Amino acid sequence: MVDLVVRGGLVFDGTGAAPVVADVAVQDGRVVAVGPDLALKGDEEIDAAGKMVTPGWVDIHTHYDGQITWDSRMTPSSTLGATTVVAGNCGVGFAPVRPQDHDTLIRLMEGVEDIPGAALHEGLSWDWESFDDYMKAVERLPHDIDVAVQVPHGALRVYVMGERGANRDPATAEENATMRRLTAEAISAGALGFSTTRTMVHRTADGDLTPTIGAARDEMIAIAQGLADAGSGVLQIVSDFREMDEEFALLREMMVVSGQPLSFSMVQADVVPDQWRHLMTRLDQAAEDGLPMKAQVAGRPVGLMLGLQGSAHPFISRPSYQAIKDLPLAGKVAAMRDPDFRARLIAEAPLKDHPFINSLAGAHHKMFELGDPPNYEPDPSESLGRRAKALGVNPDELIYDALVADEGRAFLYFPMHNYVEGSLDNVRTMLANPNTLSGLSDGGAHVGAICDVSLPTYMLTHWCRDRTRGAKFELAEVIRSQTLDTARAVGLEDRGVLAPGYLADINIIDFDRLRLKPPYMVYDLPTGARRLMQEADGYVATIKSGQVIYREGQPTGALPGQLIRGFQPAPQALAAE
């Protein structure tokens, strides 16, 4: 007898090998056997005939840093097949911290990751100071899936330097030494790695540059030495790469000094449409030179959800909208249905104190109705701008009416990055590179404007089944890309594979039924703050460490998830492989 047997599914083991019809037996949270017609009997058995059986998704780019301290369920990631998430990316987080800096870190997270400050003020207990204290606070709350955390550069810098750190003053040699020591202590205590941001795009809620922008080489190298002192840890970087050669030289030096792997975010931005090609050239050269450098790539556009319930839509900067912006949704919709209000708002010039909104408001060629199921690779001819031109009307009229649809709950899709040419062909080139990783889901972040947490599901539905506008990928390679590949990239070698000794993290999927639903807004964060949510049909069951945690997207009540402390070795019997 064993605890669980998943019978007769089409098993994709996560290695990229061709699938086979087999049983998967589980005991004490780990896979003990995979093969056809196993004689083992399970205390529980699941009939997976006609279904796919895969490892659980290992999502290495999320921002659940606050949520993991107050919520046992890592939704929506865990309802969409993730069994492991890595938080603490992009240099933002909540430890280490001194009491006087709580608000500074909240304003930083609110600005960079669009997580409501009121929810963070209400939800965070702040019963920690050191990074180890923070990890202990995370451990005190049971979770549905495994979570790992990284040391965020912003919090570390403010902790060591106080207001000078927040103001981006240069660190002294003594302060660099302290950051080195604290990084080593956190990694030794179980932090999975260190993250930083070096992009001008990231700002605090007050519009200020984040504390880590422009951090000097000496500071970055001191932190890399902290990883070397601990003998472990990964490096995660976000950068504009404005001075590409200089920046890459720094990343390479950090890897050499630390002796640890590094990943950076890579997207195609409209303002530098060919930068990703130059990044790939340098990435490939690093790999040839024996440096374990990877680029994290999103498998679809980084897309804004524009809507009356969200953080952004084209009319926020119109004077007439300012008069109704604080009304509840029903009040906004009632006001906007007034023909005189509609005509007046559409005719107005925008206020100049909303530069970001105004920059997207005129980009009618990049605004699309999302649809059901949502279409994340829309044809440019379907944009509201092109449709308006064909109809001979002002594009703002179509946009206005689309936002008011469904009682104001509708969202328009605005592909902000990865869609310069109006297709995902360049994204496919990025994904096909062996030195890239499937990432950038941003689970738990941008809760009022972006809902890319469903990327692992989209990789299966769009890239392996539904795409009509270009080449696809094979299921086995996509499954490997978000299980074994992502797990190994961050040192979690005990998961991502369905083979004896590995964690029994499993998805049972009805591939014919697998379908993403449109994102929608819920108000379930502390203080009733909003966040975008997304669901999918087709996840028959998600199993974490041998326990079924979701059936058809509904929680079972099981909470077997753990805080991961540091790198995890491969199972003993398979370590040689």
Image: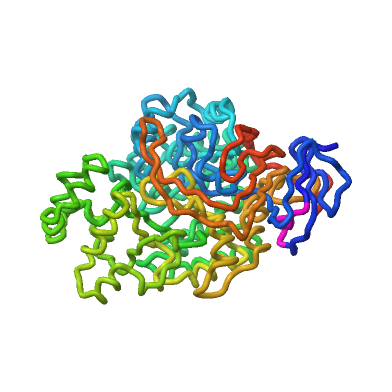
- Relative to 133, residue 190 above or below: below
Q: Residue furthest right?
A: 39
Residue 72 sits in which quadrant? top right
Q: Which residues are magenta?
A: 8-16
Looking at the image, which residue is at 54% across and 37% down? 183
Residue 207 lies within the magenta run: no
Q: Position of residue 269 (x, y in %)?
A: 39, 64
- Relative to 20, residue 198 above or below: above
Q: Is residue 165 left or right of residue 36?
A: left
Q: Position of residue 91 (x, y in %)?
A: 46, 44
Q: Residue furthest top?
A: 127
Q: Is residue 385 left or right of residue 37?
A: left
Residue 12 lies within the magenta run: yes
Query: In terms of depth relative to the viewer, which is nearer, 572 or 497?
Result: 497
- Number of numbered markers: 0
Query: In terms of depth relative to the viewer, which is nearer, 280 or 259?
Result: 280
- Relative to 529, residue 420 above or below: below
Q: Position of residue 363 (x, y in %)?
A: 28, 65
Q: Is residue 398 left or right of residue 60?
A: left
Looking at the image, which residue is at 73% across and 45% down? 46
> Which quadrant is home to the C terminus?
bottom right
Residue 159 sits in which quadrant? top left
Looking at the image, which residue is at 67% across and 46% down? 492
